[in-house]
Amino acid sequence: DLIDLLNGNIFFVTGNHEKGYKDFDKLRKMIISKGVKILDDEVISYKGIDILGINDPSEYISLNKKVKKNTRKEIDEKLSSIIKKSKNDFRILLVHRPEFFDIYVKYNINLIFSGHTHGGQVRIFNKGVFSSGQGFFGKYCGGIFTKKDSVMYNSRGLGNNFPFAKRVFNRPQIIEVIIKNTNSN
């Protein structure tokens, strides 16, 4: 239903739970049929901008069983490979994990959209109490972060699907960013 409500081009990358979702293949086919472009470790050029997408390497087989991987190393290797195919000066990265912001900065990504922490599910004093991959009061937990020429938006997202991980002081979020070319040419 959300896809039908959104107007425009939609790009998608997987997070750590999608592959463990029992109907993921069905969901994948459905969103593709609605025109969503799934970026699976690839780059596409769109209106003079390169949009890069990393398929999250960590995955859950079920809610309680996770495949163990060196996620940091794998994301670095994936981005190293994908960036070689980038042709435009402005790059947007769709990636699930904000905790690897330093990797994205290393590859001179201009704009990063990430999720994963959901703002910390529980927020106190406008800070996430606990974030996946970052622990207590994670550094990149919901918000806008800048380093060198890179800006990362870490969305609180929509997730609220686990009985033990309900949101407290942390409303679901969809962000809209409008990118304008300010060149006078």
Image (tube, rainbow, N blue to C red):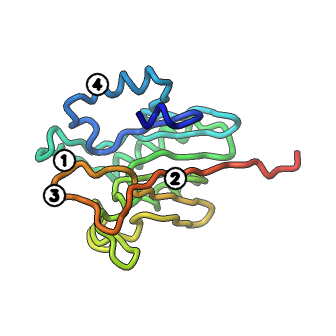
Image marks 4 and 3: residues in contact by CB distance under 8 Å: no
Front tag of 1 and 2 = 2
- Provide residue 49's location: percent of width, then percent of height: 66, 40
Image marks 1 and 4: residues in contact by CB distance under 8 Å: no
**Nearer the observer, 143 or 34:** 34
Separation of residues labelled 1 and 3 (CA atoms)? 22 Å
Separation of residues labelled 1 and 2 (CA atoms)? 31 Å
Separation of residues labelled 2 and 4 (CA atoms)? 26 Å
Q: Is residue 71 left or right of residue 176?
A: left
What's the residue type where badge 3 is placed? Phe
Tag 1 residue:
68
Q: Secondary structure at mark 1?
A: loop
Q: Secondary structure at mark 2?
A: loop
What's the residue type where badge 4 is placed? Asp
Q: Quadrant of residue 38?
A: top left
> Of callouts 1 and 2, which one flags the residue occurring earlier in the amino acid sequence?
1
Q: Which mark is residue 175?
A: 2
> Of callouts 4 and 3, which one flags the residue occurring earlier in the amino acid sequence?
4
Q: Is residue 43 above or below residue 76?
A: above
Tag 3 residue:
164
Query: Outermost residue, left direction?
Result: 64
Task: Name the residue rendered at 27%, 30% in the picture.
Answer: 24
Separation of residues labelled 2 and 3 (CA atoms)? 25 Å
Image marks 1 and 3: residues in contact by CB distance under 8 Å: no
Q: Is residue 48 above or below residue 29?
A: below
> Of callouts 2 and 3, which one flags the residue occurring earlier in the amino acid sequence?
3
**Nearer the observer, 151 or 12:** 12
